[in-house]
Image (tube, rainbow, N blue to C red):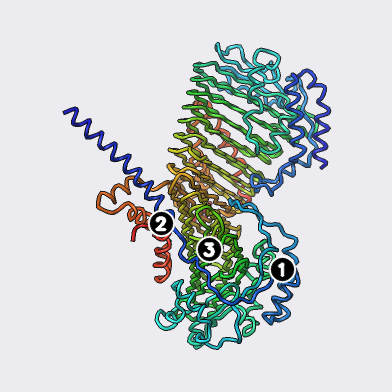
Amino acid sequence: MDSQAHYLQQFANAAHARSAEPSWLRARREAALADFQRLGFPSQKLEDWRYTNVREISETPFVLTTPKTVGSLSSASREALQDPSFDRGPRIVFVNGIFSAELSALDSSPKGLRVESLCAAPQRDTERLIEENLGQHLADNLSSFAALNTALFQDGVFVHLARGLVLEHPIQILHLLDTTLSDGESACFSRNLYLLEPDSHATIVETVLNFGDTRFLCNAITEIVVSRGASLKHVVLQRGNATSLHVSATQVRQDAASRFESISILLGGKLARSDLRSLLNAERAECKMRGLYAACQHQLVDQHTFVSHEKPLCTSEGYYKGILADRAHGVFNGRVIVQPHAQKTSSLQSNKNLLLSDGAEIDSKPELIIHADDVKCAHGSTTGSLSEDSLFYLRSRGLSEDEAKNLLTRAFAAEITALLPSEHLRHRTDAWLTEYFAEHFLSDGNSNKKPIGVTS
Amino acid sequence: MTKQRDQISGSCATDISAREEDSSHAIKQLTEQEYKYGFVTEIEEDSFAPGLDESVVVRLSEKKREPQWLLDFRIKAFRRWLTMEEPRWAFLRYPTIDYQAASYYSAPKKKKTLQSLDEVDPELIETYNKLGISLEEQKRLQGVAVDAVFDSVSVATTFREELARQGILFCSFSDAVQTYPDLVKKYLGSVVPYSDNFFATLNSAVFSDGSFAYIPKGVRCPMELSTYFRINAANTGQFERTLLIADEGGYVSYLEGCTAPMRDENQLHAAVVELVALDSAHIKYSTVQNWYPGNKKGIGGIYNLVTKRGKAMKNAKISWTQVETGSAITWKYPSCLLVGDNSVGEFYSVAMTNNFQQADTGTKMIHIGKNTSSTIVSKGISAGRSQNSYRGLVSIQQKATGARNYSQCDSLLLGDQCGAHTFPYIEVRNTSSVVEHEASTSKINEEQLFYCQQRGISIENAISLIVNGFCKEVLRELPMEFAVEAQNLLGLQLEGTVG
């Protein structure tokens, strides 16, 4: 296949950069490239990609991004950096997938915490940790994108929390994907590794922002290990645009009595696919996954979650809400597996979708695969549109149709945004949503049918 | 005082653990049942040698003196089938089926064409009596018209004349091809096209017989129509084809039951059922499937790979009710194409698996017309080392405004070696529709068991009671005669020592 040949060429081109890497990493990259050659890009015949067509990615000859001077950042990117939530705690910034020391603020890191560029780290004392963990937690069937990422990743974040360390402020990770800096259609492959030693506590906030109007592919793979008694709150805020393509996957491994909580806000993108997987590897682990996805125009958002209960007494919870307008396409797939002997498992999953126009589509597929009998598992999925009664109620109290719709849509989203850990984040997200809804869902009304009984 | 309390709590603890032991023992006993329909009838059979190629299809068609258009339909399907691959997406593990090993035609040898039930081979009548399907009795007493299909061919149809007086046509598929070729030609393959899927295409090529019914405009069928399927011969596949047409405003309730002898090799059953409900018609289709499930070690049993689908036109209603207790492998998704505005689809299912049985069953509700609605209630019960999956699709097309769906899938696990899985697919493309799905999985509630036992109900009866209660929403949808049979079947799979 041509697209495969293109990436083989990219791999060959980057040979020079790899020469400085340790031999184990080079071996892993080569093995992963062979995997990618064997697998190719996923077709819609694969159950995991049933509703998502990746032709736009496989047929575009993306060129890997290269380091750029920060001086050429667009004003929009600069503005994003001014957000007050970035002022506290350690902050690490990547521009088009490449670490920017100038924009990052890592001096304030407390003792026992490492936050650094993954590619800078292997040369130093953390190399052993990285060697032991990098690529070792990915499930076998994590798709060819993971293989391609291992082969080509340029940089990423390495986070390490020492035993018992409790962080006061969240670690801020900012990805600026600014096509005004790159030449033509480009791609970045980023790779992250977060290791939490026993009894440590942290909050990590990842913000991914797209700027510019050239096609841009971002492929990110994150591996997370939450050791015994440790706790991680992982927040992902991703705002795509009409030309952004995102394929990201996060694999978590949880040890005994660990806690992992994910809150994600996925806002648009030409194509945004997110896989979140957790392996509950020991007793009494707890996993919560909650998120919101929204899309409009011809965008596609695809949220996959997967929880594997390997041992008894674990609990998991999944709650995802979707808002789709215009001709947008939303996909939700939540899979829970309870392995044999994983008794006393409790797992609840829920997916709720709001369709704002008739051209929009949602494909929801919650799955339960259960091999143990002493379990309590349930899932639910609903799809509908804004309640006419609620709209009428608000209109009768003097709100315009747009205001009423906006209010109800934000209220639908608020259940998830309210979970965000700080006031700043809630404000920022709420502002995004308001702007996004105002821009796409409302006022222009091109494809929005007026609800019956409501005149504007 | 303290000592006393210790003693009491101590004895309580023993009680609880004894109770748990009791209940797991009872579950074990209940779930280790024998199949009681496993006998073989010694009867002269007229059958083809094993093997499948185009000449078999031609010979089969010749044997049945079929018209050219039907032969063309078979050949077209057969050629298509050769290009298709067996589907492997279901949550089922079974060895590749050797399609050349089976015989594609087996019929009780008969000397001449039968005129009435009196001429049916007494051995056959005896077989059906053993199954509790007394053709004689049913004819006289119960008012259920039965079409009995033995291996591949229909052997007897009761009440045919009485039904004909109302204009209702009910006969074997082969008869229908000869007697009402226009109706068959018009509707055959109109709901399940010859190219639909691997097993349906195979069936289109080699189907041997089945039932046919036509309800004329505005006629409410006065009795339940029923087909009883029996696989008897070894090494045969059964490929029956059922076509049911309810003309405008017609109503029919149709029952289907099936059994097979115990054999060590797996036998293939790939049927196709097509329902056509024209404007304002109502078809209720009930199945109690009790094919031989294989023995306790998972050897033998029927591979039940069935395509069932109904098409509902304006204001029509199609209702599927199934109780699936048999078969080693079940691959079955009775579906509704809700084409007409205001049409209604329903699916009520109980699937019980035991030992090494595997079931992947569910439904598809395709909403195409406006204001269409569908209800899905699925109850899965797994015991032993079985795997039981619900797989369903609810698709709301863009033009299906005002569509409504409610799905509920519950699974009950008896024992820690079995699996219960749920795979719903929900696709919605318009804003005025409301779709709800919920599913839950758990084991029998210890407190409920305790409550029953405390009131003097034995543990076996308590489990049976709870399981029956769990299935009640579905069982009450069955016609009276079948509901009794279904409850007995569930009991048979569950109860054992308890009379």
Q: CA distance from mark 2 to mark 1?
A: 41 Å
Q: Which residue is mark 1?
A: B77
Q: The residue marked by circle 3 belongs to what chain?
A: B
Instruction: Answer with mark 2 or mark 3, whichever residue precedes in sequence.
Output: 3
Q: Secondary structure at mark 3?
A: loop
Q: Which residue is mark 2?
A: B494
Taking the spot 69% from the left edge, 28% from the top edge, the residue there is A190
Instruction: Answer with mark 3 or mark 1, whichever residue precedes in sequence.
Output: 1
Taking the spot 48% from the left edge, 60% from the top edge, the residue there is B325
In this view, the mark in front (2 or 3): 3
Query: Which of the image's four quarters has the C terminus of chain B?
Result: bottom left
Taking the spot 65% from the left edge, 44% from the top edge, the residue there is A300
Q: Secondary structure at mark 1?
A: helix
Q: The residue marked by circle 2 belongs to what chain?
A: B
Local crowd size for mark 3, using a 10 Å CA cut-off: few (<14), some (14–19), many (≥20): many
Q: CA distance from mark 3 to mark 1?
A: 31 Å
Query: Is residue A74 placed above or below B30 in the rendered structure?
Result: above
In this view, the mark in front (3 or 1): 3
Q: Residue furthest front?
A: B42
Q: What type is the residue that disc 3 sits on?
A: Met
Q: Which residue is mark 3?
A: B262
Residue B425: percent from left, percent from top: 57, 52
Local crowd size for mark 1, using a 10 Å CA cut-off: few (<14), some (14–19), many (≥20): many
Residue B12: percent from left, percent from top: 26, 37
Residue A374: percent from left, percent from top: 42, 42
Compared across the picture, whether A456 is left or right of A45 comes to left
Residue B298: percent from left, percent from top: 54, 54
Compared across the picture, whether A65 is left or right of A431 comes to right
Number of numbered labels in the structure image: 3
